[in-house]
Image (tube, coloured by chain):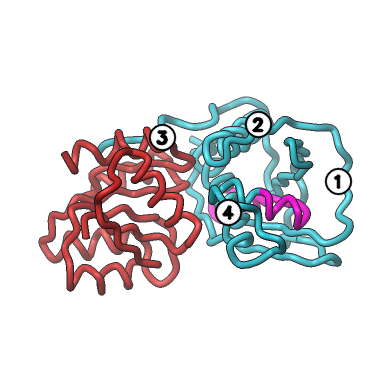
Chain colours: A red, B cyan
Amino acid sequence: MDILVVDDSRTMRIILLRAIKQAGYRTLTVGEAENGAQALEKLRGDKPRLILSDWNMPEMSGLELLRQVRASNDNIPFGFVTTEGSAEMRALAKKSGADFLLSKPFTSDDIYEAISPILE
Amino acid sequence: MKTEVSVDTVVQIVQSIFTTMMDLEVTTIDLPWQPTGERLTSSVYLEGDWNGAVSLECNGEQACRFAGQFLSMEPPDAVDDDVRDVLGEMANMIGGNIKSAMGMDIRLSMPSVIDGSNYELRVCGSEVKDRIGFSFVGGSFWVTVLGKEGLKPGTTSASDSSLVVM
């Protein structure tokens, strides 16, 4: 698995998968999880090159997922893809160890700009 | 410091979401709100320095059209979970961007979607601050802001740059 997409919305997972392919990464393998807890389960078996996560999710938020990933000394690159892009949330994301925060709505060009420095 | 968003900002946010995610041009229309027939309302609730809700409302046919456009597929024949999920995500994006534009300490709820023909959305203690009608090639829809504090004109821009590298 190259990228793990974490979002409770099936719609957004579909949109993200499509945007990743449109950004030129057609051959990458992309895993999916519906929330932070499910993502942690998946991370036990496979370490992706990048985690793309929503912020606001039931059971375990994206921020809690990031904190748990970093607490386990895992330096997997982590980006938020979220509707919430306030300065406070960006600061909190950075402080917690996120590599970037991409706010919705986004284009495939935005996705490319965000993930290409990490994947290439 | 608190800032509030203008109606113009809400319109910019809605237009940006429809253009970017669905390649649909939408314009505002002066259309009376007539909640009749089968319809869907997707909402997110905001709680904190500003309390209220943001909702998106349209009929089933338009919701199916949005889902088709959003997911790049043929519109479903009837409202299903995918259609509700798309409507919920649209409300989530509109509400999240309004929250960001406000620049306040506000928490955003998960989106919820109601569909039916005989209901009214009320948020305790809140009133309709703005109800904006939009039209697109497939019909019309409304975005409603309910709140306990007024939306005052022109204090913020629609959004910051979408990507921020940490």
Residue topped by disc 1: B33
Q: CA distance from mark 1 to mark 2?
A: 21 Å
The quadrant holding residue B94 is top right
Callout 1: helix, strand or loop?
Answer: loop
Residues tagged 3 and 1 counted as in contact (Cβ below 8 A)? no
Residues tagged 1 and 4 counted as in contact (Cβ below 8 A)? no
Q: How many marks?
A: 4
On what subunit does the disc labeled 3 rest? B
Look at discs 2 and 3 and give the one toward the viewer. 2
Res. B162 mark: 3
**Residue interval drawn in magenta:** B44-65
**Residue B161 position (above or below residue B97):** above
Q: State which tag comes first along the sequence, 1 or 2.
A: 2
Q: Answer whether residue B49 is visible to the viewer in this image.
A: no
Res. B25 mark: 2
Callout 2: helix, strand or loop?
Answer: loop
Residues tagged 3 and 4 counted as in contact (Cβ below 8 A)? no
